Amino acid sequence: MVEKKPWGGRFEGPTDKLVEAYTASLPLDQRLARYDIEGSIAWARALQKAGVLTPEEMDKIVRGLEEVGREIEKEGVPDDPSFEDIHMYVERRLIERIGTLGGKLHTGRSRNDQVALDLRLYLRAEIGEVRRLLLRLQEALLTLAEAHPDAILPGYTHLQRAQPVLFAHHCLAYVEMFERDAARFADCLARVDVLPLGSGALAGTTFAVDREYLARLLNFPAVSRNSLDAVADRDFALEFLAAASIAMVHVSRLAEEITLWASAEFAFLELPDAFATGSSIMPQKKNPDVAELARGKAGRVIGDLVALLVTLKGLPLTYNRDLQEDKERVFDAADTLKGTLAVLAPLVAALQVRTDRMRAAAEEGLLNATDVADYLAAKGLPFRQAHEVVGQIVRKCLAEKKRIEDLSLEVLRAFSPYFGEDVYPFMRLEACVDRRLTAGGTARARVREALREARARLRAAEGGA
Ligand code: ARG
C-alpha cells in the first residue's frame, strides 16, 4: 500500500520514486535528530502554555518524543527516502507510538522555522567543540615554544632568510592566529544563538505561543525579530563557514611549514613516526601526509563556504527548498575542521625540533646584515649610506663564502671608518634578536613575557571553555 504523505491531502497521486530520492534529506539531516527532538519538546511545552495542549497531552507527547529520541540513538533511522527528512520521520514515529495525539505537535509550527532552529542548535554545540579543539592546538604550540625558549632560526620574507628570530616567537605567531579564530567563532555564536521557532512557515503563528518562554526553555539569549527573516536567514551558517575557512587557512599555513621544515632541505623538524606515513615504493621515505591533507582540506572547507554563498545569493524571501543544501556544506566543514584540529594538536605536540639545524641556517644567511647597517646608522652614518656599505660587505662575503663576523676589523674599516671593535658582540645572533625589544618583537625578554601571557590567557580560556 502506498502510504500517504503528511501533506498528502491535496494530492491525488503518489510521488514519483525519483522525486522522493532526489528531494529527501533524511540521510543527511538524521544527525539533527537530537536537536529536532529537543526543539519539539520545547514546542510541546509552549503549546500547552498557549492552551493548545492539555498538561496530560503535553506529557504524553514529551514522553513519546523522548522515546523516539532513544530509539533513534540506538537504532538509527531507516534508509528510506519516502520519509523525506528528520522532521517528518520524528513526527511519524511519534504518531506510531502515541497515536493521533502526536498529530497535534505540529500545530502552529512549520518545518521552515523547525529546520532553522535545529541547525542553530547543532551549530551552537559544534562551535563549543571547535573552540575546545582550537585550545588544544594552541596548547600544543605553546608547549613546543616553552620547551625551546632560546632557539634561534632564520625568519623569512619571500621565503628568503631575512633576520634571526626565536623559534618560540614563530610558534606564538600561530597561537595568535588560532586565538583570533576562537574569537571569531565566539562572535559567530552571538548570531547563531537567536531563536527562530515561532516564526511559522514565514508570517508568524496564529496560536498564542510565548516565544520568550521558548527561548528560555532552549537557552537562547535572544528571539528573532522578524518571521520572514527568521526562516530565510542562513547568515549564521555563512559566518560559521567563514570562520571555519579562515581557521583552515591558518591550519594550512602551519601544515605547509611543517611539510617544508620536515624536508631534508630544511630539516628543522623531525616528524614523529606515529604521525608520518611511508611510501609504497621508496623504502627510505617518511612522508608528512597528515600535514599535507590538512593543507588540502582547507580547499574543501573554502569550497563549502563558496557553495553556500552561491546557493543563497539569488533566493527571494522567504524559505526556498534550495536552503536544504546548507546542511551538507555545514556538516562537511564542521567535520573537516574538527577532524583536522584533532589530529594536528598531537602531531605538533610530538614534533622533534632540530634547534641545531635552525641555528646553523641562521648562522649561514648573513642574517645580521640589517643589524650591521643599524650599527653604522647608530654611529651617525645616514641609514641609506649604511645600507649601501653593508651591501658591498655582503658581496665580499658571498664571493669569499664568509660571514660578516669572519672579516677582520681592518677589512671592515676599509668599508667604513665608523666600524669599531664593538661591532663583533653587536653582530651575534642573540644580540640581534635581543635588540628587537619593541612590544611584539622577538627579543628573548619580550618572548619570555609573551609566553607567560599566552599561558595565562590559555588557562583563562580553558577555565571558561
Ligand atoms: N528538509 C528541509 C530542509 O532541510 C526541511 C524544511 C522543508 N520545508 C518545506 N517547506 N519543504 O530545508
Image: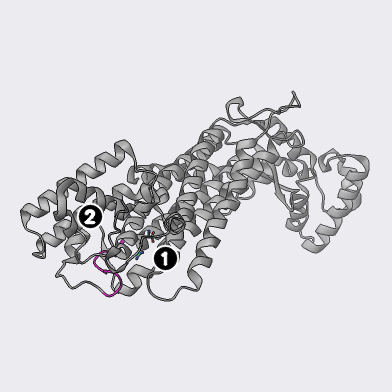
Under mark 1, the amino acid is Arg
In-image side of 335 versus 11 (left or right): right
Q: Is mark 1 within 8 Å of ligand 1?
A: yes
Badge 1 marks a residue whose secondary structure is: helix
Find ligand 1 in the image and state its quadrant: bottom left
Dominant secondary structure (helix, strand or loop) of the stretch shown in magenta: loop
Quarter of the C terminus within the rendering: top left
- Residue stretch rendered in magenta on the structure: 194-203
Under mark 2, the amino acid is Ser
Vertical arrangement, residue 226 with respect to residue 270, above or below: below
Residue 313 appearing in the image: yes
Q: What residue is disc 1 on?
A: 321
Q: What residue is disc 2 on?
A: 40
When asked about the image quadrant of residue 183, the answer is bottom left
- Please tell me whether residue 426 belongs to the stretch shown in magenta: no
Badge 2 marks a residue whose secondary structure is: helix
Residue at (16% x, 59% y) in the render = 104
The reply to whether callout 1 and callout 2 are in contact (CB within 8 Å) is no
Residue at (47% x, 53% y) in the render = 328
Which tag, 1 or 2, sits closer to the chain's start?
A: 2
When asked about the image quadrant of residue 445, the answer is top right
In-image side of 52 versus 216 (left or right): left
When asked about the image quadrant of residue 232, the answer is bottom left
Q: Residues within 10 Å of mark 2 (few under 14, many from 20)?
A: many
Residue 195 appearing in the image: no
Identity of the residue furthest to the right in this view: 399
